[in-house]
Each structure stands twice: as C-alpha cells, then as structure tokens.
Amino acid sequence: MKVITHGQDTFDDVIDAVRVSGGKISFMENLEPTLEDVFLHITGRGVRDSVEQKTPVAPHSRFEANRIR
C-alpha cells in the first residue's frame, strides 16, 4: 500500500495507525519535493518542456564540423 500525506507529524500518524490495526511496516521514505516538482505542479509542465518550446533548434551548418572543441 502506498500512502501519500503532508505535514510534520505524518510519520507518527501513519505508524500509530498501522500499529492500531495490527499491521507491519516494511518500508517508509520521506520524499521532499524538488524545484522541478514544484514547477511542474504550478505550471503543469516540466522545465525541460518549457525550454524545448522556447529554444529554436538550429540546423546543422557546414561550419559545425570545423569548430574547435
């Protein structure tokens, strides 16, 4: 079972609920949202999607092979 919750006392609440019901916890993980997660939540699209839409893709020029790398 996967449980998604929010708040500071979440782990304690989940552990108490599992203990009361006689269940066992095999794994718990606390995941903090990343900036990418927040951006996706607010805009509905990923940062890479936004960049790809705004960045024109230049065609390969005949000079590209001669560039110093």
Image (spheres, rainbow, N blue to C red):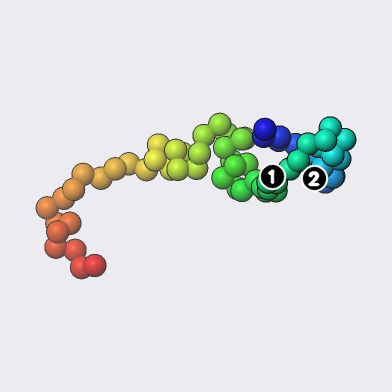
Total residue callouts = 2
> Could you tell me which residue is drawn at 71 percent across and 34 percent down?
3
Which residue type does callout 2 highlight? Phe
**Which quadrant holds the N terminus?**
top right
Image vertical order of residue 63 relative to residue 30, above or below: below
Q: Residues within 10 Å of mark 2 (few under 14, many from 20)?
A: some
Image vertical order of residue 4 relative to residue 30, above or below: above
> Could you tell me which residue is drawn at 87 percent across and 35 percent down?
20
Q: CA distance from mark 2 to mark 1?
A: 14 Å
Q: Nearer the viewer, mark 2 or mark 1?
A: 1
Q: Which mark is residue 62?
A: none
Measuring from the top left, give residue 22's x and y in whole percent.
83, 35
Residue 2 lies left or right of residue 49; in this view the side is: right
Residue that extends furthest to the bottom in the rendered view of this protein? 68
Measuring from the top left, give residue 29's x and y in whole percent.
68, 48
Rendered image quadrant of residue 25: top right
Which residue type does callout 1 highlight? Ser
Q: Which residue is mark 1?
A: 26
> Could you tell me which residue is drawn at 29 percent across and 43 percent down?
57
Residue that extends furthest to the left in the rendered view of this protein? 62
Describe the element under mark 2 as helix, strand or loop: helix
Q: Residues within 10 Å of mark 1 (few under 14, many from 20)?
A: few
**Which quadrant holds the C terminus?**
bottom left
Q: Which residue is mark 2?
A: 11
The answer, for residue 63, to whether it is visible in the render is yes
